[in-house]
Structure formats: C-alpha cells, structure tokens
Amino acid sequence: MNLSNLKPAEGSTKTRKRIGRGPGSGLGGTSTRGHKGAKSRSGYKKKVGFEGGQMPLQRRVPKFGFKNINRVEYKAINLETLQALAEAKKLEKIGIEALVEAGFVSENQLVKILGKGAISAKLEVEAHAFSKSAEAAIVAVGGTVVKL
C-alpha cells in the first residue's frame, strides 16, 4: 500500500453538490440559480402551459363549439343484432340484462333500438328508446315493445 492507491472507504463519500455553503465552496453566492428572474427566487413554480410571458396557447386559440349539458346519449342496437342474438341464444325476451351479458352494452348505458336489418322472430324487446321503424318492425312480426 502506498499513497497512489489510497481511496476512501465505500459509502463514506457523497457525490451530491452542496450548494449555498459560502464562497470558498465555489457554489455559494447565487447557489447555481443565476442572477435575478423568477427562477432565482424561493418558492418559484412554473404554471402549466407557461410560455415565458408569451400569451399561452390555450389563451391564443379562440373559444369554439358548444356542449349541451342536457344531451342524452344512447347506445344504438340494430334489429339485425337482436335477430342474431335471439337465434344464437334462443331467446324470446331481450332486455338490458341479455344485451349486457352478450357484451353489446354496459350496465349503466341507455339503449336505443334502431331499424336497420330485418327481424323474423317474435320477440319482447325492452329498451330505453326505439326508432319508429324499429318499433313498427317488431310489432309487425307479433313482438312487443317495452320502453323502460
């Protein structure tokens, strides 16, 4: 062992810069923050979307559109889908539970039956809404329509 291969014990030294510990450390004075400006102050936080004083994008872009807070959104199910479901599972009554079980809707969705496709099975159909053509087609083959 000699002076050329001396080294400190493992874990005894730290690589972290100790800033703000006087001018002798080389990291005193401004403590690596530079002179003046918002970033040199204590408590500085940059707001989301801040662009250095330039007008931020979300304030430059004009307001646009309209959101109707009273909108009621339905999950659309066509007659051909009901016919295929009735044939596959041999159902006579199709309600929300049957549609949820088949994976067409989730439990909290509102369902509207639309008139695309043909229906030949005599079905009792439960849903939140029906189009006029769907209602007419279901009743024409001897089925019944139940609005929830």
Image (cartoon, rainbow, N blue to C red):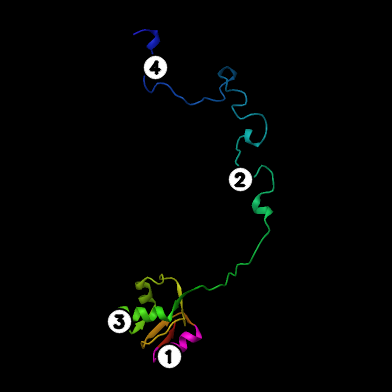
Q: Which residue is mark 3?
A: 90
Residues marked 4 and 3 touching at CB (< 8 Å):
no
Q: Which amino acid type is marked by label 1?
A: Val
- Look at the numbered disc 4 and give the secondary structure of its residue: loop
The span from disc 2 to disc 1 (Cα, nearest Å) is 61 Å
- Which label sits on residue 8? 4
Q: Label 1: how many residues lie within 10 Å, few (<14), some (14-19) or many (20+)?
A: some
- Give the percent coordinates (x, y) of residue 7: 39, 15
Q: Which amino acid type is marked by label 2?
A: Lys
Q: Which of the two labelled residues, at mark 4 and mark 2, occupies the earlier sequence position? A: 4
Residues marked 2 and 1 touching at CB (< 8 Å):
no
- Which is more foreground, mark 1 or mark 4? 1
* Extent of the magenta region: 131-143
Report the residue at 50% width, 86% height from top: 132
Q: Which of the two labelled residues, at mark 4 and mark 3, occupies the earlier sequence position? A: 4
- Look at the numbered disc 3 and give the secondary structure of its residue: loop
Q: Which of the two labelled residues, at mark 2 and mark 3, occupies the earlier sequence position? A: 2
In this view, which residue lies farthest toward the left? 90
Which corner quadrant holds the C terminus?
A: bottom left
Q: Which residue is mark 1?
A: 139
Q: Label 2: how many residues lie within 10 Å, few (<14), some (14-19) or many (20+)?
A: few
